[in-house]
Amino acid sequence: MPAISLLLFTASLAFAASLPSSTDGVSDFKAGRYSEAAAELARASDPTSRAFFALSKAALGDCKTALPGLTAPYSDPTLARLTSLAAVKCDPAHSFDRIARLEQLFPNDPDVLYTAAKLHMKAFNDATFAMFQRAPASYRVHELSAEIFEVEARYSDAVAEYTKAIELNPAAPDLHYRLGRALLLESHDPAVLVQAAAEFRSELKLSPEDAACEFQLGQIAQVQSNSAEAKSHFERALALSPDFVQALISLGKLSSQQKDYPRAIALLSRATSLQPSNETAHYALLTAYRDSGDMPRANAEKATLDKLQKPPQGEFSEFLKKLGEKPPEQ
């Protein structure tokens, strides 16, 4: 079965099954007999037949014949969805415009989302191949290689590639930050912390208002038991980005450790208002309330945290239990 026909068959099976059984061409399509479906439907003129004729021709790889029928307007939203999905495959020149329109019309449709993912993945692979072929000595090649290594959790390789990229273009934005982060992902040894901090400071020389670098420096200072420096960096991160939830949590925890409970509660309350499902923020707020002696509010946070941590119930959760799997975390 051609690649396009597999998508067409799975996407249109449910709809085809709902059509009258007397629609022989559609029945042939449903059974995977695309040649017979096309021959049968070629003689019909109603919208459903025209749509499935085009889908059949597309499934056979004859996009030239199929495209007029795939791009025709259909009042039935299901026909419009099926033909547009096939048109994405048959008409590469306009595929991104078509998939963007489909995502607007059917934002939660798994076939639409799958097709969009495949389309963007192919575009990424094609662009990556072109870059490696045409600009193999550029810093961008090393930067992209490093990002791929990060995704694969090959942090030492990522560090090596980011280092090469910086050697080629030390003033490129974001490279020092990403090298610092890769170093931290690879190790938290004291010497590595110093090296990572140097990279974050180098990034700040290029981008003085980079809140993420300030936050990372605060985290490193905490590990190095330098609370005053950590506090300064977290405050700077929040001055640059007031809705930086992780910085709110870190500064809130630090304030709580220093027994500045009013400030800790204010910071952590803001974090929970920005991200109501953030368990770390709720737990830190619970601790701040408890340590300040406000047990009613601490108990309220405990109830919220218990609700967040409660496994979802329902048919799918029961199915997972039978398989011995944990339900997905929310």
Image (tube, rainbow, N blue to C red):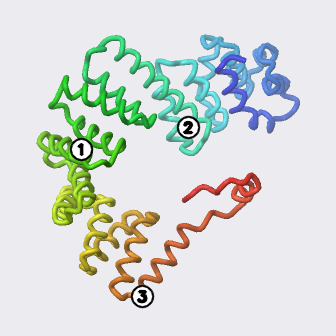
Frontmost of labels 2 and 1 is 1
Q: Is residue 210 above or below residue 151?
A: below
Frontmost of labels 3 and 1 is 1
Q: Position of residue 47 (x, y in %)?
A: 70, 28
Frontmost of labels 2 and 3 is 3
Q: Residues within 10 Å of mark 2 (few under 14, many from 20)?
A: some
Q: Is residue 223 above or below residue 135?
A: below
Identify the mark nearer the N-term, 2 or 3. Answer: 2
Q: Residue at x 75, y 37 (%)?
A: 14
Q: Residue at x 26, y 42 (%)?
A: 180
Identify the mark at residue 244; answer none if there is no mark: none
Distance of label 3 from label 1 (alpha carbons) = 40 Å
Q: Is 160 left or right of 300, judged from the image as shown?
A: left
Please identify the residue farthest to the right as the structure is shown.
22
Looking at numbered disc 2 in the image, what kind of residue is underneath it?
Leu
Identify the mark nearer the N-term, 3 or 1. Answer: 1
Rendering quarter of residue 236: bottom left
Q: Position of residue 244 (x, y in %)?
A: 29, 58
Residue annotated with mark 3: 295
Q: Which SS class for mark 1?
A: helix
Q: Position of residue 98 (x, y in %)?
A: 50, 29
Residue annotated with mark 1: 196
Q: Position of residue 202 (x, y in %)?
A: 15, 41
Q: Residue at x 53, y 36 (%)?
A: 102
